[in-house]
Image (cartoon, rainbow, N blue to C red):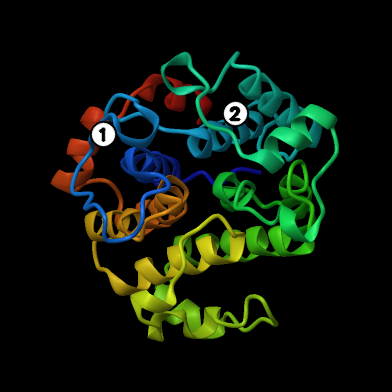
Amino acid sequence: MMNTNKNRYEDAMYGLAIGDALGVPYEFKDRGSFECTEMVGNGSHGQPAGTWSDDTSMTIATAKSLKDCDGKVDIENITDNFLSWSKGKDFNCNGKLFDIGIATSTALDTGKSQTGEFDNGNGSLMRILPLAFTDCTDEEIRAVSAITHGHEISMQACVIYVHVARRLLAGETIREIIPTLKFAKPFNRLDKIDQLSEDDISSGGFVVHTLEASLWVLAKYDSFKDTVLAAVNLGDDTDTTGAVAGGLAGIVYGLESDFAKECMEVLRSKEMIAECL
């Protein structure tokens, strides 16, 4: 069953897309070598300003399945949507596929979830947020992750993230939530993530690092603008860190600020996102 709070769902999904699009031009760039302050084009992928990547594509593909299946998790249906996206048929900004992770590509090409220790990229975390707006179980969250990323670390990261999002939706603050996030390694820093410095935060493709970075910026900053810009400016996997943080920031702050409205004006293929929600 889907959560009926439509506005907050839209805020989360568009917040994710904005974070993604802000980060696209800077992907793979080192921290400190650039400063993101607004939507720009060109850069790492040579895309127009406001272009979002695989993070948003796979998120709205998941959302479309939930919409079509009355809020129920249907693994086959979600997988079919992912395949349609990966073949360039649907869910691509500007109608063009330009970014896909190795584990995701391999899993979709072979039909086999990637379960190795080195298959713990952030490719399932980046697309899992729509499940926070359903009453799906932890096992269903794990199963959706495992379409591409089936290692325990990736699946657990998705469960933690969805639970954090649900608690934010219920009115808890991120600073109330963080001390309760007590887990064994490799998630053992989450309960004190807000106490760490920027130098302690990594922002590459490892799923634990992306989860940590998204919670860190949400705890450190007090507006949608500052949160998503800080996420992107951490560098490296800028679009995914921006997306994962942006979805949560959309829940917390909404998109009523001037900055969010300006980003929405530039954001491309908005009608495609709207059709999936």
Q: Amino acid at mark 1?
A: Met
Q: Residue 229: image x %, image y %?
A: 27, 54
Element class at badge 2: helix
The residue identified by callout 2 is: 64
Q: Nearer the viewer, residue 130 or 216?
A: 216
Vertical comparison of 243 with 102: above or below: below
Q: Amino acid at mark 2?
A: Lys
> What is the spatial separation of the Cα atoms under label 2 and label 1, in whole angstroms?
20 Å
- Is residue 74 visible to the viewer in this orientation of the structure? no
Compare marks 2 and 1 and give the one earlier in the sequence.
Answer: 2
Q: Residues within 10 Å of mark 1 (few under 14, many from 20)?
A: some
Q: Nearer the viewer, residue 22 or 44?
A: 44
Give the residue displayed 47% in from the left and 53% down from the top: 244
Give the residue displayed 72% in from the left and 39% down from the top: 72
Q: Residue 82: image x %, image y %?
A: 67, 28
- Is residue 220 visible to the viewer in this orientation of the structure? yes
Give the residue displayed 69% in from the left and 57% down from the top: 120
For this view, does 234 lie left or right of residue 184? left
For this view, does 238 lie left or right of residue 158? left
Q: Residues within 10 Å of mark 2 (few under 14, many from 20)?
A: many
Q: Quadrant of residue 138?
A: bottom right
The residue identified by callout 1 is: 264
Q: Quadrant of residue 161?
A: bottom right
Q: Say which quadrant the N terminus sits in.
A: top right
Give the residue displayed 51% in from the left and 43% down from the top: 4
